[in-house]
Amino acid sequence: MSEKERAQGQHQDRPTAPAGKLRAATRLVRGGTLRSNFGETSEAIFLTSGFSYASAEAAEARFRHDEPGFIYSRFSNPTVAMFEERMALLEGAEAARATASGMAAVNAALTCQLRAGDRVVAARALFGSCTYILKEILPRFGVITELVDGTDLAAWQRALAPGAACIFLETPSNPTLEIIDLVEVAKLAHAAGAIVVVDNVFATPMLQKPLELGADVVVYSATKHIDGQGRCLGGVILSSQDFLDNHLAPYLRHTGPAMSPFNAWVLLKGLETLHLRVARHSENAARVADFLADQPGIGRVLYPGRADHPQAALAKRQMSGGGGMVGFDVAGGKAGAFRMLDRLRLIDISNNLGDAKSLVTHPATTTHQRLNQAERESLGIGDGMLRLSVGLEDVEDLIEDLAQALE
Ligand SMILES: *Cc1c(COP(=O)(O)O)cnc(C)c1O
C-alpha cells in the first residue's frame, strides 16, 4: 500500500443528521451507521473476536468503563452495534441487543429476568420452540408457567390474579393468525406487576409497534423478514435501558448467545429494504387470500387484513397492514393438503417464513407435530390446514401456481 493510499485511511466524517429527527425509511437505510476511517459507504464487517488497546492503562480504563470502546465480540462488536442501533431506532426502543437466533432472543428475554418461584403467564398459540421453553425448560428451574387462550381477556385476568413476573405472547400467532389485544392484555399484566414480552415476528416492526401499545420488551427472529432473503439466522431483543442494564446485558455477556458480525452485516443490508419488502409481502398476501377465499376446494381463510377475520376490527386497530402470512384449510384433510402441496410448481414446501420466496408448510405434520391431536384442535390447527408465507414474486404467478395445484 502506498503512503497516499494509507493517508486515505484518515477519513474525517462530516457531521451527520441527528437520527432521532429522521423518518422511518431513512433510519432503515442510515440509522446507526459507524464509519471507519476509510469512509466506506456500505457498513463494514468487523469480523474480529477481540480488540487491542494502545496501552495497559487504556485496557484498564476500558474494562472499568471509564473509557468507551469495544472489548470482546461476545459483549459487543462494531457491526453488531450498528444493527442494534438501527433496530432500536426503528422500534422506538431505548436499547437493543442482537442474538444468534430468534430462539436465543426469546430464551434470553425470559430467562434473564426470572428466578425460581416466579410465575409466567403466556398465550398458548405460540411458535413450537417458545412452547418448549415455557413448558419444558423453565419449570425445571422452579418457574411456574401457565398457558391461556390469548384472545380471552377473562382468562388472562384469572391467570394473572395470583401475580406474575412476566407474560409472553405472539400476535398474530403462528399458524392460525389469532390477534391478541395488546393494549388490554398489557394493562392487566401491569396491574399484576408483570413485565410484558411480545414476539412480534409475524407483524414485523413495520406493521405493529408493541412498545407503543404497552409492551415492555419486544423480541424478533431476524431470520424472518429482517433478513427476508433466507440467508442467515439472527434475533434481537428491544427494551428500556433499565431492563438492559439490570437484566439483559449481564445475562448475555456471561452466557454468550452473541450474533456473528457477518450475520449482523447481512441483517443491516436487509433492514435497508424492509419497508419496501413488507409492503409488497402484504399486498401480495391480501391478493392471495382473496383468491383462495373464492376457491371451492378451500374452507376457511385466515388473513388479518380480510374483513372476515374473526378479529378484523382489532387487527385494524393495532396493525397498519395484514402482513405476509395466510392460513387456510384444504378440503380432504391431510390427504387433500398433501395433494395440493405436492402439485405446487413454484411455491416451495418449507417451514421458514418471511422470505422473498413464497413458502408453504403443513403445520400439523411439521412445526406443530409435537402437539397431540387434541392440543392442535384446541388451537384450530386442523389436518387440512396450510400456512403460506407469501413472497415477493409477481402475485399473478403465485395465483396461477395455486390455481393449478387446486385443479
Ligand atoms: C421463527 C420464529 C422464532 C424463532 O426464530 P429462529 O430465528 O428460527 O430461532 C420465534 N418466534 C416466531 C414467531 C418465529 O416465527
Image (cartoon, rainbow, N blue to C red):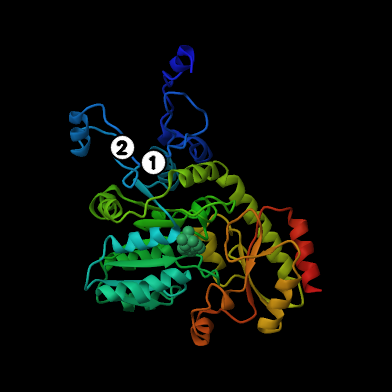
Give yes or no for contact between labels 1 and 2 (Cβ–Cβ under 8 Å): yes
User: Horizontal and vertical percent for residue 402?
Assistant: 75, 67
Between the residue at mark 1 and the residue at mark 2, the CA separation in whole angstroms equals 10 Å
Residue 185 - label = none
User: Horizontal and vertical percent for residue 125?
Assistant: 47, 73
Q: Residue 148 falls in which quadrant of the image?
A: bottom left
Q: Decide which of 37, 359 is in the foreground and name it.
A: 37
Helix, strand or loop for disc 1 = helix
Residue with the most extreme bottom position: 374
**Neighbour class for label 2 at 10 Å: few (<14), some, many (≥20)?**
some
Q: Is residue 339 visible?
A: yes
Number of marks: 2
Residue 70 - label = 2
Q: Residue 320 falls in which quadrant of the image?
A: bottom right
- Residue at 57%, 46% (x, y): give it: 275
Q: Which residue is mark 1?
A: 81
**Neighbour class for label 1 at 10 Å: few (<14), some, many (≥20)?**
many
